Image (cartoon, rainbow, N blue to C red):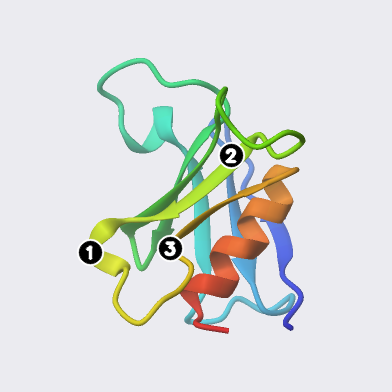
Amino acid sequence: MQEFGLLLESSAHAGLSLCADSKMEKDYLLLKRASASRPSGEWNDDDYDVLADGLIVGRIFKVNAAPVGQPWMWTLATEHHENRAPTHGYAATREAAMAAFAKSWRRE
């Protein structure tokens, strides 16, 4: 299992990057607040889009109806389900949801 580091961008709408090590790799994922990535509508501060190569490939967000102790849901966008499993899940923390998303995305 690979370990994923968190890198913060310095802006009001900080994005978080998931990459295999401290170097930015081609295969990195960017976590961006929905309010910054989708300016139309009102978005919760705990709602993020996951981007790869500038395209939204999924979402990580806090939900009210979730398994006990796992309020964070992650999901791959429908068009990116091919050969990936699982395509969604729940986690106790945002960081755990990010790691689960990255593992599925990279087909590990």
Type of amino acid at the residue the image marks with label 3:
Thr
Tell me the residue at 41%/76% (across/down): 84
Q: Nearer the viewer, mark 1 or mark 2?
A: 1
Q: Quick one: SS at disc 1?
A: helix
**Circle nearer the N terminus (3, 2):** 2
Verify CB contact (< 8 Å) between mark 1 and mark 2: no
- Reading the image, the residue beneath label 3 is 87
- In the rendered image of this protein, does residue 62 appear above or below residue 74? above
- The residues tagged by marks 1 and 2 sit, at their Cα atoms, a distance apart of 26 Å
Tell me the residue at 77%/36% (across/down): 69
- In the rendered image of this protein, does residue 68 appear above or below residue 49? above
Tell me the residue at 57%/22% (across/down): 64
- In the rendered image of this protein, does residue 94 appear above or below residue 80? above
- Reading the image, the residue beneath label 2 is 14
- In the rendered image of this protein, does residue 49 appear above or below residue 26? above
Type of amino acid at the residue the image marks with label 1:
Glu
**Circle nearer the N terminus (1, 2):** 2
- Depth check, front residue: 98 or 82: 82
- Reading the image, the residue beneath label 1 is 79
Q: Give the crowd class for mark 1: few <14, some 14-19, many >=20 residues within 10 Å.
A: few
- Depth check, front residue: 62 or 64: 64
Type of amino acid at the residue the image marks with label 2:
Ala
Tell me the residue at 42%/21% (across/down): 43
Q: Position of residue 24 (x, y in %)?
A: 60, 76
Verify CB contact (< 8 Å) between mark 3 and mark 1: no
